[in-house]
Every structure is written in C-alpha cells, then in structure tokens.
Amino acid sequence: MASSIPKSESFTIHELSQQSSLPEPTLRYYEKIGIIQPVPRDPSSGHRRYPADTVRMVKTLVCLRASDLPIEDMRTYLQLLEKRTQGAIQQKELSHTHSKNSNIKSSTYKLENSILREKLPIGMPWNGEILRQPRA
C-alpha cells in the first residue's frame, strides 16, 4: 500500500474530481488499471489523498481524454512523458498518429452529416427508408 502524506500537500478524491472535472469513479478506474499510480491513503480514514504530482498527471489525463485518445495510448503517452527528452520523438509520433486518426473521424462525421442534411428534407429517416409523403 502507498505511504501517507500530509493533508496540506494532498487532495481528496472529491477535491480532485472538482478540480479536474473527472468523475470520482473515473479517477478510481484509472488507479485500478494502473494509469494513476496507487494513491496514498489517510491513515485515520483510509480515504485516498492525491499528492501534487498525481494532480499534475490527472490534469494531463484530462487533456488526453478530451482529445479522445484511447486509454492504452494515454498510458503510453504518460510513460513517454516520464522519459522526458528520450520519449519526446515517440510522443510526437503518437500525437501525430492520433491527429491523423482524429482528422479521418472528423471527415467521416462531416460526410455523414452532409448526407443526413440531404436526406432529412426529403423525408428519409435515419435507417434510410423513404417515408411516404402524405397525399394532398
């Protein structure tokens, strides 16, 4: 189990959730799957106390999550971040690959939306079947 740290230098899960906008269950999940290292516990209550370095890592996770980076890529990115300059080239490659994938998804989304905009005015529902127009 992780060691305890003074309360003045740490945050509760509730405080970190509010600061980061990540739900408490997400923070617990990230710890469970090892994206966040085991969090020290308050000896008197057993509650998690997130140290400042973990808070910084969570803020990075918020940015990665906002860009729709898959969890395994988030894990890889954080591992590369720990390597500092030795991981910089790989970080750049990961970012570039994700950016290309995001652009493809965005283009697909735009194409699907344009198709929907064309179909909806003529009475085509989402499943592609043509609706019968009411007779006048």
Image (cartoon, helix red, strand yellow):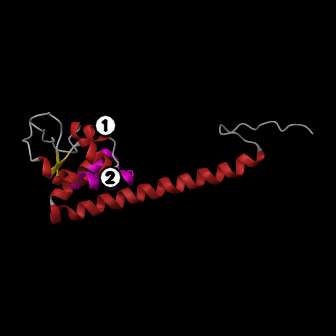
Location of the C terminus by quadrant is: top right
Q: How many marks?
A: 2
Give the residue type at disc 1: Pro
Work out whether residue 7 or residue 85 is closer to the camera in this orientation and state it: 7
Where 63 falls versus 11 (above or below)? below
Q: Residue at x 35, y 50 (%)?
A: 65
Q: Position of residue 52 (x, y in %)?
A: 17, 54
Q: Residue at x 20, y 56 (%)?
A: 80
Asked if residue 66 is among those painted magenta in the image, a careful observer would answer: yes
Where 67 falls versus 86 (above or below)? above
Crowding at mark 2 (Cα within 10 Å: few <14, some 14-19, many 20+)? some
The answer to which quarter of the image holds residue 124 is top right
Q: Residue at x 22, y 44 (%)?
A: 35
Label 2 and label 1: CA atoms lie apart by: 14 Å
Give the residue at mark 2: 62
| Dominant secondary structure, magenta | helix
Q: Position of residue 67 (x, y in %)?
A: 38, 54
Comes first in the chain, label 2 or label 1: 1
Give the residue type at disc 2: Val
Give the residue at mark 1: 25
Q: Position of residue 23 (x, y in %)?
A: 34, 42
Location of the N terminus by quadrant is: top left
Residue 118: assigned label: none
| 2 left or right of 127 in image | left
Magenta range:
56-74
Q: Are marks 2 and 1 in contact (CB under 8 Å)?
A: no
Tell me the element at label 1. Answer: helix
